[in-house]
Image (cartoon, rainbow, N blue to C red):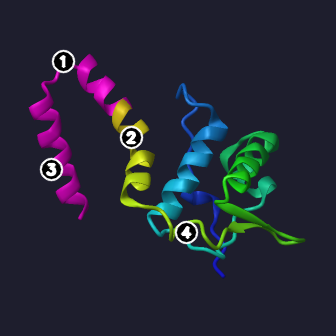
Amino acid sequence: MTTHSAHLFSISTGSPEPIYRQLVEQVKRLVAAGQMAPGDGMPSVRELAQALALNPMTVSKAYSLLEMEGVLARRRGLGMEVAERAGGGQSAAERAALLRPTLERAALEARQLELDPDTVVSLFTQILKEQA
């Protein structure tokens, strides 16, 4: 069992998306990408709240939502871990749905910058190739 540290997470305080939702989406993405596997431990609420300078109730709310959705499971006396069924059952469509909010924000910014769709798609394709 691996225990992940708080450095995997980042919060954008200027984002219109609530902080707890940012945490929820980041955990889902990490699990979908295989960076967090079933049985991996999560930082404690206190540890994550301190590392990200958040209210512990915000972290607790995110963890509770993830537990209700079956992404995380509570280990009695040991904290939270990635649930056994969390990553393996996600289809490509479910993983793509996790990317959609990020792409919607990028599309809005591209529109505000008055970039044509071909330029944006070309840039995105280039970035994908650079990341491979």
Residue 85 position by quadrant: bottom right
Is residue 125 in the magenta section?
Answer: yes
Q: Secondary structure at mark 2?
A: helix
- The stretch drawn in magenta includes residue 117: yes
| Residue at the image point whose x is 63% and y is 36% from the top | 19
Give the CA separation, mark 2 to mark 4: 20 Å
Residue position marked by numbered label 2 in the rendering: 100
> Could you say which is closer to the camera, residue 131 or residue 60?
60
Mark 1 vs mark 2: give the one in front: 2
User: Mark 1 touching mark 3, by CB under 8 A?
Assistant: no
Disc 4 from disc 1: Cα separation: 37 Å
Q: Is the Cβ of the residue at disc 4 closer than 8 Å to that at disc 1?
A: no
Write down the residue under mark 1.
Answer: 114
Residue at coordinates 69% horizontally, 62% vertically from top-left? 72
Residue 5 against residue 118 in the figure, above or below: below
Part of the protein shown in magenta:
105-132
Identity, as a three-letter code, of the amino acid under mark 4? Met
CA distance for labels 1 and 3: 19 Å
Residue 95, horizontal then vertical, whole percent: 42, 55
Helix, strand or loop at label 3? It is helix
Which circle, 3 or 4, is nearer the viewer?
Answer: 4
Residue under pointer 4: 36
- Label located before the other in sequence (2 or 4): 4
Give the distance between the C-alpha atoms of the residues marked 3 and 4, in whole angstroms.
Answer: 27 Å
* Mark 1 burial class by Cα count in 10 Å: few <14, some 14-19, many 20+: few
Residue in front for this viewpoint, 82 or 15:
82
Name which residue type carries label 1.
Answer: Glu
Question: In which quadrant of the rendered view does residue 44 lie?
Answer: bottom right
Q: Earlier in the sequence, mark 1 or mark 2?
A: 2
State if disc 2 and disc 1 touch (CB < 8 Å): no
Image-based side of 124 in relation to 36, left or right: left
- Can you identify the residue that label 3 sits on? 126
